[in-house]
Image: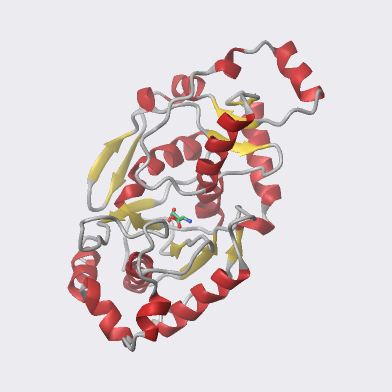
């Protein structure tokens, strides 16, 4: 199929911090079917930048579940934890452009932000950092760096928006979006000891892995605004996007590790077959979405 994409590859990018649930399967299966429709590769990326929460056990269980679901992924798996140099280089580039600054705010403040930065901010409402360290003089900055204090690299969103003006991106299901720069705060892109965040590594990796179409849940639309900003600043190609609806539980709540959604492992153990699991969200939902790719 010939679309206006710069590649026909799609990806599935789980964090190995828990077992997969039905929401993951829906996402993975849709990305897989989309790659097949486009004639591209279905690429797996393990988003394991959070060393404390990631584990080999969860990683193996992802492979096991994908195998059981007969979702074949390309053999070149990218482990983010092995590519910290790439993320460091991107931060250096942003630093040269004067688009990031070190933030030394209190440990607990930084800690909460860092925790958010390591995880994809599903349903994020942008928390706006008041900009305390943006206003530090160069001398104070240097002083604090020399004191070996802990810090995080924040995006200077005002400087960025001055540089590029209005930004837009298209979603194959939800239509055209304008990046709402006015309400996005100076988000954390990296920190001293872990030189990356979900936003930075996901954006860079989608580029490095030549992903033409990014498919993921619609709770990440706000994340895409940030990714568009980073693509623009770093001169990266923008993939096309399709944010799909979320699978909800019987109370209408998004399935997540936090709400202890039933895992594929447990559905399997209760005797369900591959087709039964797919029936739980309906094959026709995948087909409806696939029809939007044109
Ligand atoms: N690791 C992220 C997650 O599991 C991936 C989000 C994305 O597809 O960009 O939520």
Q: Is residue 209 above or below residue 196?
A: below
Q: State ligand 1's quadrant.
A: bottom left
User: Can you say which quadrant of the picture contains the N terminus?
Assistant: bottom left
Residue 258 sits in which quadrant?
bottom left
Residue 155 sits in which quadrant?
top right
Which is more toward the observer, 80 or 265? 265
Which is more toward the observer, 18 or 274? 18
Residue plotted at (59% across, 32% down) = 108
Q: Position of residue 244 (x, y in %)?
A: 28, 57
Residue plotted at (33% across, 89% down) = 271
Q: How many marks?
A: 0
Which is more toward the observer, 40 or 228? 228
Residue plotted at (45% across, 63% down) = 11
Which is more toward the observer, 37 or 63? 63
Q: Position of residue 8 (x, y in %)?
A: 40, 64
Q: Is residue 280 above or below residue 144?
A: below
């Amino acid at each position: 199929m010939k679309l206006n994409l710069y590649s026909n590859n799609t990806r599935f990018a789980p964090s190995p911090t828990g077992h997969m649930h039905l929401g993951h399967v829906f996402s993975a299966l849709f990305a897989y079917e989309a790659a097949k429709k486009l004639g591209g590769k279905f690429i797996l990326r393990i988003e394991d930048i959070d060393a404390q929460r990631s584990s080999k056990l969860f990683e193996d269980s992802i492979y096991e579940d994908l195998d059981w679901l007969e979702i074949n992924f390309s053999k070149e798996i990218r482990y983010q934890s092995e590519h910290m140099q790439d993320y460091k280089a991107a931060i250096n580039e942003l630093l040269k452009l004067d688009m990031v600054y070190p933030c030394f705010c209190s440990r607990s403040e930084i800690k909460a932000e860092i925790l958010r930065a390591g995880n994809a901010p599903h349903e994020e409402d942008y928390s706006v950092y008041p900009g305390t360290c943006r206003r530090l003089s160069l001398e104070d900055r240097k002083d604090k760096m020399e004191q070996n204090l802990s810090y995080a690299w924040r995006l200077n969103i005002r400087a960025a928006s001055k540089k590029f003006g209005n930004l837009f991106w298209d979603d194959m299901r939800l239509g055209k979006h304008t990046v709402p720069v006015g309400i996005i705060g100076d988000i954390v892109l990296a920190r001293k000891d872990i030189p990356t965040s979900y936003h930075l590594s996901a954006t860079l990796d989608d580029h490095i892995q030549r992903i033409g179409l990014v498919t993921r849940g619609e709770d990440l639309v706000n994340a895409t605004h940030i990714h568009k900003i980073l693509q623009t600043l770093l001169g990266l190609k923008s993939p096309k996007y399709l944010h799909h609806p979320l699978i909800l539980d019987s109370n209408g709540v998004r399935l997540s590790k936090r709400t202890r959604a039933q895992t594929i492992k447990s559905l399997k153990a209760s005797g369900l077959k591959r087709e039964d699991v797919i029936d739980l969200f309906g094959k026709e939902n995948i087909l409806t979405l696939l029809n939007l790719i044109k």
